[in-house]
Image (spheres, grey):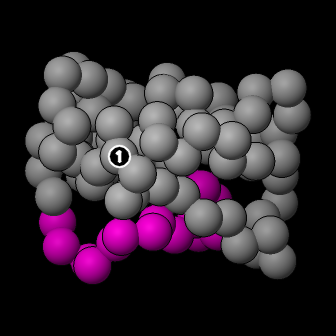
Amino acid sequence: MSDKWYPVINYEKCIECGACVEMCPNGVYETETTRPNVIHPEGCIFGCRGCGANCPTEAIEYVGDTGENIVSSCGCGCSCGGDGGSKTGCC
């Protein structure tokens, strides 16, 4: 897991659809609401952009994102097809 990579929500863009909350298997978000509250940033897998890819308003950015395409496996069901066995990223 990563303390150098995690999602940051732009609440001005966010429509609180819950897509990011529902798709993250790593406990990053509070699950009792559709409002994306990041409560465990250390749970985010380095390089995973799965929740951002699912955001219809592009309201999610990442601390530590340099724009580099990091490909590995994360287990979130995003386009990298990862199995959750890597801590190096995806997408």
Q: Residue drawn 49% across and 24% down?
A: 25
The answer to whether residue 52 shows anywhere in this view is no
Residue 61 part of the magenta segment: yes
Q: Which residue is mark 1?
A: 2
**Depicted 57 relative to depicted 32: above or below:** below
Q: Position of residue 85 (x, y in %)?
A: 18, 22
Main secondary structure found in the magenta portion = loop
**Depicted 91 relative to depicted 66: above or below:** above
- Seen from the viewer's position, the closer of residues 51 and 32 is 32
**Depicted 31 relative to depicted 64: above or below:** above
**Tag 1: Cα neighbours inside 10 Å, few (<14), some, or many (≥20)?**
some
Which quarter of the figure has residue 1? top left
Furthest residue in direction left, as rendered: 71
Q: How many marks?
A: 1
Residue 91 part of the magenta segment: no
Report whether 31 appears left or right of 40. right
Q: Position of residue 54 (x, y in %)?
A: 53, 49
What amino acid type is highlighted by mark number 1?
Ser
- Seen from the viewer's position, the closer of residues 87 and 21 is 87
Q: Residue drawn 48% across and 27% down?
A: 26
Q: Residue drawn 40% across and 51% down?
A: 3
Q: Position of residue 19 (x, y in %)?
A: 66, 41
For the record, the magenta segment spans 53-69
